[in-house]
Image (spheres, rainbow, N blue to C red):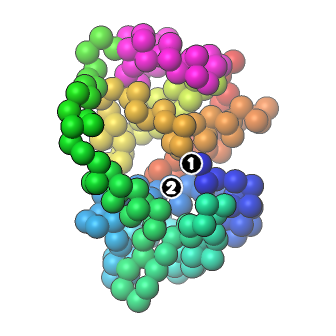
Amino acid sequence: MKNINTNFLTKLQKEFGHAGIGYYLELMCILKIKPNHLIDWKEINKIAEEMHISSKKLIKFINICFDIITSDGYRLLNRNNQYFWSDKLLIKDKKNKNRTCTKYSGRKKLTTENCIQIANITNVNLTQEQLDKLNQKYGVLFIKNAINILDKWLERKTQRTKKYLNKNNYPDFRSDSWIIHAAKQLLDNDKPSQIDTPDGVMLIDKVL
């Protein structure tokens, strides 16, 4: 994500270790699918259970996110007595709704048609053209590791991974995605790394 910087990571990792960024990414995923992108405090126990942490720890995490303001002026999470949310997500959603339909009328829906078999990869679907674009944008070794991270995550076949299976995965390699952030983290280390995913931590070996 564009707002992930050293200050951000330091504050989260100081309190929650490597899992801190994973908690944040998972909350953002939940907020994206919630009506109006709001989470009621009444749901805190259920969400904590889904995230495999205590509700007390989750509340502490949300409060710390409230105190973190990124370089573009947004709090990581905002709150009141009834809900908590992401201001940046709300603003982004409003901008998307205000765009004219004609801007997207010619956009082709991505399918798994013409996707290629990538060596040693089972679950990631990309066309050769898409793979070439990603290699050009990020570099061959970087994308090889990013694809491997996504493939290993999809192998879990959890409730969260199901919506990414058997689909064209090109949109999942956005520059602000957790996969790209995880690949950067992995390539910075010489040993297997604990990668934060939307549904927990995963140990990954670097692909050479």
Label 1 CA crowd tier, 10 Å (few <14, some 14–19, many 20+): few
* CA gap, disc 1 and disc 2: 9 Å
The residue pinned by badge 2 equals 25
- The answer, for residue 33, to whether it is visible in the render is yes
Question: In the shown orientation, is residue 153 left or right of residue 64?
Answer: left
User: In front: 30, or 99?
Assistant: 99
User: In front: 145, or 98?
Assistant: 98
The residue pinned by badge 1 equals 1
Image x and y of residue 174, in percent: 49, 36
Question: In the shown orientation, is residue 172 left or right of residue 185?
Answer: left
Residue contact between numbered discs 1 and 2, judged by CB atoms under 8 Å: yes
Numbered range of the magenta stretch: 116-141
Identify residue type, mark 2. Leu
Residue that appears at 41% across and 89% down: 81
Figure label count: 2
Quadrant position of residue 171? top left
| Residue 133 belongs to the span the image colors magenta | yes
Q: Quadrant of the C terminus?
A: top right
Label 2 CA crowd tier, 10 Å (few <14, some 14–19, many 20+): some
Tell me which label, 1 or 2, sits earlier in the chain: 1
| Residue 137 belongs to the span the image colors magenta | yes
